[in-house]
Image (spheres, rainbow, N blue to C red):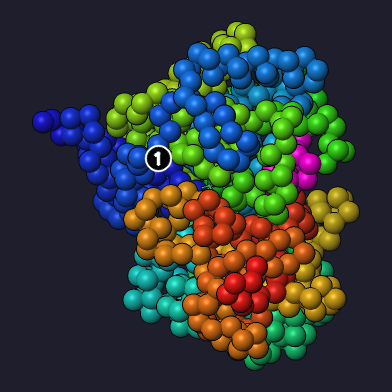
Amino acid sequence: MSTRTVRAACPHDCPDTCAMLVTVEGGRAIGVRGDPAHPPTGGVLCTKVARYTERTYHPGRLLHPLKRLGRKGEGRFQRIGWEEALDIVGSRLKAIALRDPQGILPYSYAGTMGYVQGESMAARFFHRLGASLLERTICAAAGSAGIKHTYGGGLGFDVDFADEAKLILLWGCNPITSSLHYWTRVQEAKRRGARLIAIDPYRSLTAEKCHQHIALLPGTDSALALGMMHVLIREDLLDHDYIAQHTVGFDALRERVLDYPPERVATICAIPAQQVVELALAYGTQAVTAREPVAIRIGYGLQRTHGGSQAVRALACLPGLVGAWRHRGGGALHSSSGFFPLNTDVLQRPDLIPGWPKLPRAVNMSTIGDALLQAGTKPPIEALLVYNANPVAVAPDSARVAAGFAREDLFTVVLEQFQTDTADYADIVLPATTQLEHLDIHKSYGHTYVLANNPAIAPLGEARPNSEIFRLLARQMGFDDPCFGDSDETLAAQAIDFDDARTCHMDWETLKRDGWAKLKLPEAPFAQGGFKTPSGKCEFYSAQLAAAGQDPLPGFVAPHESALSNPSLAQAYPLAMISPPARHFLNSSFANVESLRAIEGEPVVHIHPTDAAERDIGDGQAVRVFNGRGHLVLKARLTERARRGVVVIPSIWWKKLSPDGRNANELTSQALTDLGKAPTFYDCLVEVRSVVPGAS
Ligand SMILES: Nc1nc2c(c(=O)[nH]1)N[C@H]1C(S)=C(S)[C@@H](COP(=O)(O)OP(=O)(O)OC[C@H]3O[C@@H](n4cnc5c(=O)[nH]c(N)nc54)[C@H](O)[C@@H]3O)O[C@H]1N2
Ligand SMILES: Nc1nc2c(c(=O)[nH]1)N[C@H]1C(S)=C(S)[C@@H](COP(=O)(O)OP(=O)(O)OC[C@H]3O[C@@H](n4cnc5c(=O)[nH]c(N)nc54)[C@H](O)[C@@H]3O)O[C@H]1N2
Ligand SMILES: [Mo]
């Protein structure tokens, strides 16, 4: 049997975006491995993606279009042909579009991060239709806004040099789980003598391997960063030359941080004041006195609370004060997305919108529950087309989301690889291909390589790539613009057809052959300044924020739900719940792969032994976690990994694969962040009680 190797890219929502080599034997993919030549991948895949063939050939793969038979949510379907499916979808959408196409809403996120199977043909389709726009805020919009108003975009240190840093703050991130390849670099830095400090309410797998762990309360990071600045300025641990040349607003910042002495910060964060001082001194001395690279990996965990945007902004100010940008591997990294000059307008064609440049109504994906249920949504959402997303499991305030999806008058189409919690609410399910079956092109939000994904095998069953499904739907709707005829190859080539000789020259044929190529960027991106802000400097003070009526300086914004901001709520629900990623799931993806679910075991809540003792809860006991929005039952795990006052539910389980049919999003709220209109998953007060056997 002939064996061949195909160059591919991991499509999942992870900063590492690995280069994969797929082994194909007689038309069947028999294994995937990391490309040893691709520096960020280094020949290694994570446990999840190493099992990509198990996911692709999973018996639960959707292989035919389906039409709903049972009630919404029940999951009873009947197989139908593609022609019938397209006919049903086309006629429903045409009828709604006649009334108002804004009654139609796409709902998609990063099930695949590819440009071809993400927002290209799909975006053209919805734009041409005049459908409502979707605000894609569910993951990173708060942090993106914070970083944009400080650096001008998702820009930061190059992870290829991350092992050169001598002090690394892993702040609100857990790379052993969520960015394994960056962790490899951090370990190398540690071998070369770097000191590692984790800042996280939870002693994560990463935090326990660091030299120090600062376990602050969720949603208090901006206070800690401002307290560090207070000490740095007080002790004159500053790079005055860098501040003068490449930053704006230092004087205003100095005034602001006077409000954040270590004692006040310690109270807000519920940590010793000494920790604040020592952290600042460690950072400032290494950078300014020793003149060595210091790095802050700004994770996503800390921006899922009310002040998430300000928190990222406050952290992002630190490197400019101490001149950390002068060195390779120094500075900060939240996202590297802003380095990629990809051609999104050509791919997405917003000019197809009827009435362009006037835009249709926009709906925020993070409040989809309310958007579907509120009578005030005008025009009402009559049809929902879901792809690359599993909102019934992942969106906050899940009971509201499920109630919205259960609306009898809502027409829901779900493009999926699997029968997810969301697909159970579909009127029509359309089977989608996996990464091994389709073509794509990828950027990364953790490194600066562009990657090609060549299809390795033919589509399974009657599954089709998203791009092809939207091409067929466009034909069904009678859209005849030539752009609906573009092939996947054409779309991929369009994505990198940019005219930016400084960044790189890429052509699709070469990229397909080689698998990946790195952008041409300076090794220390801001050693000479060159931020993408309006001033071209690192903006401690943002005139843009001031003009928008926002706080122009970084500041502490208290969580929506905390003893500080809402004492009576905190009395009823005294524990802060966070629900960060479980290591062997990727959001809700892979939660249906048996071997991975077996490693995770069952849904659990981590609770500090003292908090448990106060509630008479024993290890392994069934407990009810609840607040005013909902409840769920799972097993208690007594562990000092959870600090006092904080409980942790590793997530995101499929609801229907959880013993009580619910997951952590039963408890999370639809309240939004300070900037970016993002969700506040980790800003959520709860109470926990043991479940008395026999009682309900
Ligand atoms: N295995 C795996 N990898 C993943 C994912 C996955 O689900 N599974 N998800 C992917 C996606 S979509 C994303 S966005 C990234 C996210 O990756 P990360 O940037 O690592 O972010 P999170 O995993 O959300 O949270 C990281 C840590 O932040 C902590 N945390 C929670 N609240 C706070 C807070 O208020 N302050 C501080 N300082 N820390 C806090 C959590 O306890 C957690 O340990 O990972 C990606 N990688
Ligand atoms: N409680 C809690 N909730 C959270 C988070 C948390 O930390 N705690 N994290 C939040 C974050 S950071 C994020 S990013 C969101 C993630 O939310 P989502 O982006 O919805 O991610 P997934 O749950 O992985 O669902 C992606 C779906 O896309 C499907 N898919 C993959 N590839 C394709 C394809 O090519 N075509 C089609 N049609 N489908 C495909 C997969 O099968 C999967 O079911 O969840 C958020 N929700
Ligand atoms: Mo995310």
Query: What secondary structure do most residues of the magenta stretch adopt?
Result: helix
Task: From the image, tell me which residue sits under label 1.
Answer: 60
Quadrant of residue 215 within the rendered picture: bottom right
Residue 657 point in image, percent of width and height: 49, 53
Residue 516 seen by the camera: no
**In the image, residue 182 above or below residue 235:** above
**In the image, residue 635 above or below residue 444:** below
> Helix, strand, or loop for circle 1?
loop
Quadrant holding the N terminus: top left
Quadrant holding the C terminus: bottom right
Residue 427 within the magenta-colored segment of the rendering: no
Residue 562 point in image, percent of width and height: 77, 73
Q: Residue at x 76, y 35 (%)?
A: 362
Q: Residue at x 13, y 30 (%)?
A: 2
Specify the segment rendered in magenta.
Answer: 362-373
Choose between 649 and 222: the one closer to the eye.
649
Other-residue count near label 1 (Cα within 10 Å), few / some / many at <14 / 14–19 / ≥20: some
Quadrant of residue 45 within the rendered picture: bottom left
What is the tally of numbered marks visible in this picture? Answer: 1
Residue 275 point in image, percent of width and height: 62, 87
Q: Amino acid at mark 1?
A: Gly
